[in-house]
Amino acid sequence: MKLYRVTIDGRVYDVEIDDPRARPVTARLSGTAYSVEIESTTVSGLNHEKPLQELPVSKEAPITGTPQPASAPAPPPASTSANTGPTTMTAPIPGLVSKVAVVAGQAVERGDELLTIEAMKMFNIMRSPSTGTVATVHVKDGDNIVQGQPLVSFST
């Protein structure tokens, strides 16, 4: 686990992150765990992620501050550029698909349950990252999946 400094809506927080390469990332702030996505931007066809700023960790100094999750962060402004096609959610962990909750053509809202992955006797609910329509469901109940495997594609 490493300590990072993150900025959310202009406020700076010191956050513990289990594995910065995992998707979604598990971040702890004042002892509360949050599942967060790290946004990427595409520039000239290349995928760039903003690097996390790693901080030195002192065993004596606990993370201080109060989380402010009373209201969800405002969604980014709508893009004026044309959508280049469907986006795809990939498996953040290997496991077994225990339940698929959506079908192709179904409209979903951000946070809606898409499917459940069982891994190490834990059930991990995969939720919609945005509002849109399910274009393709790439897995079915009982499928064994690997990390990075396509799960659901969306059209917005």
Image (cartoon, grey):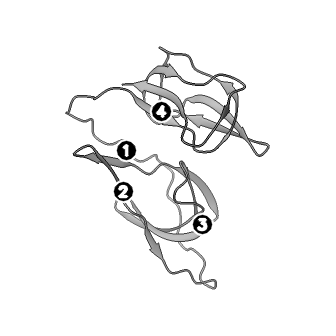
Tag 1–tag 3 contact (CB < 8 Å): no
Tag 2: residue type? Asp
Circle 2 Cα neighbour tier, 10 Å, few/some/many (<14 / 14–19 / ≥20): few
Kind of residue sitting beneath label 1:
Ala
Q: Position of residue 88 (x, y in %)?
A: 45, 32
How many C-alpha atoms fall within 10 Å of the one at disc 3: few (<14), some, or many (≥20)?
some
Residue 74, label in figure: 1
Q: Pointer 4 and pointer 1: residues touching (CB < 8 Å)?
A: no
How far across and down, in percent of the image, does residue 107 sit? 47, 18
Q: Earlier in the sequence, mark 2 or mark 3?
A: 2
Residue at the spot 52% in from the left edge and 60% down from the top edge: 20
Disc 1 crowd, CA 10 A, few/some/many (<14, 14-19, 20+): few
Q: What's the residue type where badge 4 is placed?
A: Arg
Proximity of marks 1 and 2: CB atoms separated by less than 8 Å: yes
Q: Is mark 2 on a helix, strand or loop?
A: loop
Of the two numbered discs 4 and 2 on the same chain, state the one appearing first in sequence: 2
Disc 2 marks which residue? 9
Expressed as whole percent of the image width and height from the top left, the position of residue 78 reads 27, 35
Q: Choose the circle earlier in sequence order: 1 or 3.
A: 3
* Residue 119, quarter of the rendered image: top right
Q: Residues within 10 Å of mark 4 (few under 14, many from 20)?
A: few
Distance in Å between CA atoms under marks 4 and 3: 26 Å
The label on residue 30 is 3
Under circle 3, the secondary element is loop
The answer to whether residue 23 is left or right of residue 53 is: right
Spatial separation of the CA atoms under disc 4 and disc 2: 19 Å
Q: Which of marks 4 and 1 is nearer the N terminus?
A: 1
Front-most of residues 33 and 24: 24
Q: Which is nearer the eye, 126 or 76?
A: 126
Residue 110 numbered tag: 4
Q: Which quarter of the rendering shows the N terminus?
A: bottom right
